[in-house]
Image (cartoon, helix red, strand yellow):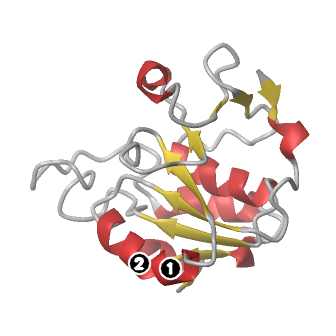
Amino acid sequence: MIDLAAYQGRHRGERCAVLGGGPSLIEDIKAVRPLMMQGGMKIGVNQHALLLSLDYIVYQDRELFPILTGHAPVISHHKDACDIWSGICPDFGFSGGTAVWIAEYLGFEEIYVCGCDNYMTNRRYWHSKLGDLRVEDGISNIQAWVKVRDYMKEPEKVKVASGCLTQVFKGL
C-alpha cells in the first residue's frame, strides 16, 4: 500500500475525467471525448465505470473492494483495502467528491467531471431502473460539493459536463 502523499503532483499538467455513476455519465463522456482525445486519464468512482479502461478507482464503501481490485490502482481511506491510501484527503463522506479532490491533489491541470448528478435526476445511477430515486442522507445536497470545492486549492481546474454541479464548478 502506498500513501497518497507520495503521489502529490504526479500528473501535473495532464488532464483527467472523473467518472461518477449518475444517469448523465453516458452523455457526459460523449461531451468530454473531444477534450480527452489528446490524451487524458480516467478516474472511476466506485464500480460505475469498470466497463472502461481506468487509470485509478476511488471508493469509500468497503464492500466494493473485492470487485474493484485488479482493474486499476484503487484509492481509498480503508488502509487494508486499497493500493493507495487516501489518508491525507478530507473525508467528504462520498466517493465522487473524494475523487475530484484527489484529482486536484494528483496535479491534474484539467479535471472533467462526468456522471455526478448528486442523486437529483430521474434515477439513481446510469445503470439503475427508471424510478430508482433513493437519496443519500447528507450528500444529496449541493452543499456536500461546496465543501469539496472549498477544500480544494484550485477549484477552477474543475469543469462539469452537465447538471446541478455547474452551480458549484464551471461548466464545459
Question: Which quarter of the image is occupied by the N terminus?
Answer: top right
Tell me if 166 is positioned left or right of 30 in this view.
Answer: right
Residue, x 46% and y 46% (percent of image)?
138
In the image, taking residue 122 as reference, residue 14 lies left or right, namely right
Within-10-Å neighbours for mark 1: few <14, some 14–19, many 20+: few
The outermost residue toward the top is 80
Name above or below for residue 155 compared with residue 78. Answer: below
Residue in front for this viewpoint, 42 or 121: 42
Residue type marked 2: Ser
Q: Position of residue 93 (x, y in %)?
A: 56, 39
Check disc 2 and report its element: helix, strand or loop: loop
* Residue drawn at the location 61% of the way across and 50% of the way down: 99
Circles 2 and 1: CB atoms closer than 8 Å: yes
71 above or below 153? above
Q: Residue at x 54, y 32 (%)?
A: 60
Residue 138 lies, with reference to residue 80, above or below; the image says below
- What's the distance in space between the residues labelled 2 and 1, CA to CA? 7 Å
Classify 10 Å Cα crowding around label 2: few (below 14), some (14-19), many (20 and above): many
| Circle 1: element type | helix
Q: Is residue 137 left or right of residue 171?
A: left
Which residue corresponds to mark 1? 166
Mark 2 or 1: in front is 2
Q: Which residue is mark 2?
A: 162
Does residue 79 lie above or below 140 as drawn?
above
Per the rendering, the mark at residue 63 is none
Q: In the current view of this chain or complex, which residue is farthest to the front?
A: 38
| 1 and 171: which is toward the camera | 1
Give the residue type that dot 1 points to: Thr
Residue 146 percent coordinates (x, y): 61, 64
Residue 109 percent coordinates (x, y): 77, 72
Between 54 and 161, the one lying in front of the other is 54
The structure residue drawn at horizontal position 56% and vertical position 75%, both measured from the top left corner, is 36
